[in-house]
Image (cartoon, rainbow, N blue to C red):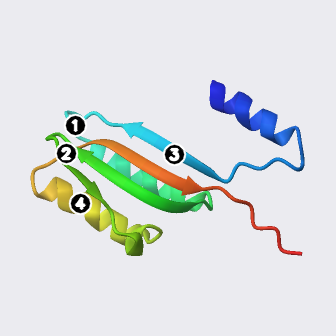
Amino acid sequence: MIYRKLFDWIDGDDACEATAVTLYSAHDPSHDGERDFIIRRVKSLIETGVTIQSIILKYDKPVHRHLPDSCLNDVDDIVNAINGIYDSGETIETMIIEVSIKEHHWT
């Protein structure tokens, strides 16, 4: 895949660094376990150590919800937002997540 080649290219030069990535994640609203899958994916993304800069959740209607900055790196807040969407009868079709992958070099 292109992103693997890109990150290999970046790793080939110690003075080169990627600082941000936008993740596009499509979901199947007809699948019964999709809510749990989305929650597991968000939790595991946070566990990687990235800093989430924005999350946009697109529903099955032409509606989207931009999660507030205050909850972006709090797993419980994100899970509550996802559960709120599903509990209201909506389903998530797409997540667009912008993350910071900047390394923190403490010297």
- Picture layout, residue 64 above or below residue 104: above
Kindly check if marks 1 and 2 are in contact, taking CB atoms under 8 A apart as contact. Answer: yes
Mark 3 to mark 2: distance in Å? 21 Å
Residue 22's tag is 3
3 above or below 76? above
Name the residue carrying label 4.
Answer: 83
Amino acid beneath label 1: Pro
Callout 4, which amino acid?
Asn
Residue drawn 61% across the image and 57% down it: 48
Q: Name the amino acid type tagged 3.
A: Thr
Q: Is residue 43 above or below residue 27?
A: below
Residue plotted at (35% across, 64% down): 78
Mark 3 nearby-residue class (10 Å; few <14, some 14–19, many ≥20): some
Direction top: furthest residue: 1
Q: What crowding class fits label 4: few (fewer than 14 Cα within 10 Å), some (14-19), or many (20 or more)?
A: some
Residue at 90 percent of width and 48 percent of height: 14
Q: Secondary structure at mark 4?
A: helix
| Disc 3 versus disc 2: nearer the observer | 3
Quarter of the image containing the N terminus?
A: top right
Closest to the observer: 32 or 14? 14
Residue 39 location in percent, x, y? Answer: 37, 54
Q: CA distance from mark 1 to mark 2?
A: 6 Å
Q: Which residue is mark 2?
A: 91
- What residue type is disc 2 on? Thr
Q: CA distance from mark 1 to mark 3?
A: 22 Å
Front position among marks 4 and 3? 3
Which mark, residue 6?
A: none
Q: Earlier in the sequence, mark 1 or mark 3?
A: 3
Q: Which residue is mark 1?
A: 29
The residue nearer to you, when weighing 42 against 104, is 104
Mark 3 and mark 2 in contact? Answer it, CB < 8 Å: no
